Image (spheres, rainbow, N blue to C red):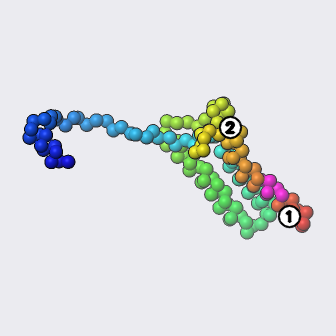
Amino acid sequence: MSHIVHDLIARGDARVVELPEAAPVRHQVDVDRNFGLPTALYGATVAGYLGFLVIVGSAFANPVLAIPMAIFVLFIIAGFGIPAIWTRLAGNASAPQTFGEFETRGIMTNTGRLAPRDAAIQVLILPVLLVIWGLAVAVIAAVVA
């Protein structure tokens, strides 16, 4: 490659120009630390997980369970709190969708656009099933005891 350039310069066909001044850095990718869903869906998810722990913790109240329950609560808060802090870092120009935007646009996934109802079901199915499971286990434990 350099041999070709030297030949062009020797023949006088190449144009040698001065180095331009430092150009501003251009980022190819916009920073988007947003997860695309309304904040209330994440709040409902956290409420479902913590609700399960409250139900199970109160149904099987035992001093031995205090430390494991506290650890579970810390994991849930960290699991949702750290990404929430991450979305608010400097340089993030995006904001989460409002419910109105979510209802009109839905959300784009790897497999295509997802309707708002379907997205909400996918996000909330596990927390809701956990709360139902916790209630069922608490009722069974109360009936057996």
Residue shown at 59%/49% (left/top)?
81
Q: On the picture, is 103 further left or further right than 3?
A: right
Q: Which mark is residue 141?
A: 1
Residue 11, by quadrant, is top left
Q: On the picture, is 116 further left or further right than 14?
A: right
Q: Is residue 18 above or below residue 136?
A: above
Q: Which mark is residue 116?
A: 2
Q: Where residue 30 sits: x, y (%)?
A: 45, 39
In the image shown, does 94 or 27 lie closer to the viewer?
27
Residue shown at 65%/40% (left/top)?
114
Residue shown at 65%/45% (left/top)?
42
User: Which structural element holds mark 1?
Assistant: helix
Q: Where residue 53 sits: x, y (%)?
A: 73, 57
Q: On the picture, is 67 further left or further right than 132?
A: left
Q: Where residue 17 sits: x, y (%)?
A: 16, 34
Residue type (three-letter) at the residue carrying disc 1: Ala
Residue type (three-letter) at the residue carrying disc 2: Pro
User: Which structural element holds mark 2?
Assistant: helix
Task: Point out the frontmost of discs 1 and 2.
Answer: 2
Q: Main secondary structure of the magenta part?
A: helix
Dot 1 or dot 2: first in sequence order is 2
On whether residue 30 falls in the magenta region, the answer is: no
On whether residue 135 falls in the magenta region, the answer is: yes
